[in-house]
Each structure stands twice: as structure tokens, then as C-alpha cells.
Image (cartoon, grey):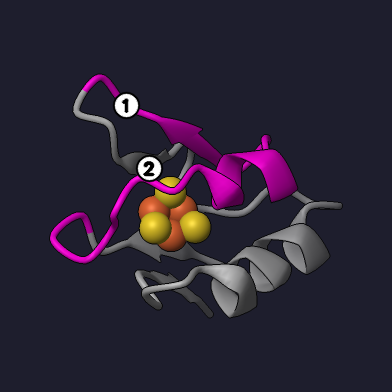
Amino acid sequence: MKAVVDKDACIGCGLCPSIAPDVFEMGDDGKAHVITSTVPAGSEDAAKESEDSCPVNAITVQ
Ligand code: F3S
């Protein structure tokens, strides 16, 4: 499973690192970054929840 953040779309709401801290972190640019593009085992559900929860649909998990 891979996670990608569209940095042009991200508005820096901070939701995804709070839901899936092993997958996403906030960067110095105020936008979310993936910590590792391959979602760690055990974080798949949280990654999917982040994708569903992002207010601007900036996250793709597949
Ligand atoms: Fe950005 Fe969406 Fe995460 S706006 S901080 S990618 S929940």
C-alpha cells in the first residue's frame, strides 16, 4: 500500500498526521509529507482513514 500527498492541494490542516502519525508528518513548509511512501504494516486502516478525512482530498492511498 502506497500513500501520496498532493502538496499543491494540501492546506496544512494537520489531520492526517494526527490520524496516522506513522505515515504522515507536517513539513517545514506547513504541508503534510509522507514519512515513507510504503504504508507500514498496521497503519493501513489509519492511512485509509486519513485519505477519507482530508478536507481537500489531497491524499491518495492505494
Ligand atoms: Fe493536508 Fe489533508 Fe493532511 S489538508 S495536512 S493532506 S489531512
Residue displayed at 25% across by 19% down: 28
Residue displayed at 62% across by 64% down: 50
The residue lying toward the viewer, choosing from 36 and 32, is 32
Q: Does the Cβ of the disc 2 residue fall within 8 Å of ligand 1?
A: yes
Taking 28 as reference, is 53 left or right?
right
Quadrant of the rendered image containing residue 48: bottom right
| Furthest-top residue in this view | 28
Residue 59 seen from this side: yes
Determine the CA span between mark 1 and mark 2.
6 Å
- For disc 2, the neighbor class at 10 Å (few under 14, some 14 to 19, many from 20) is many
Q: Chief secondary structure of the magenta span?
A: loop
Residue 37 seen from this side: no
- Vertical position of residue 33 compared to residue 1: above or below: above
User: Tag 1, which secondary structure?
Assistant: loop
Name which residue type carries label 1: Gly
Percent coordinates x, y for residue 1 in the rendering: 60, 69
Taking 10 as reference, is 45 left or right?
right
User: Tag 2, which secondary structure?
Assistant: strand
Badge number at residue 32: 2
Name which residue type carries label 2: Ala
Residue displayed at 56% across by 72% down: 51
| Furthest-right residue in this view | 42
Residue 13 inside the magenta-drawn segment: yes
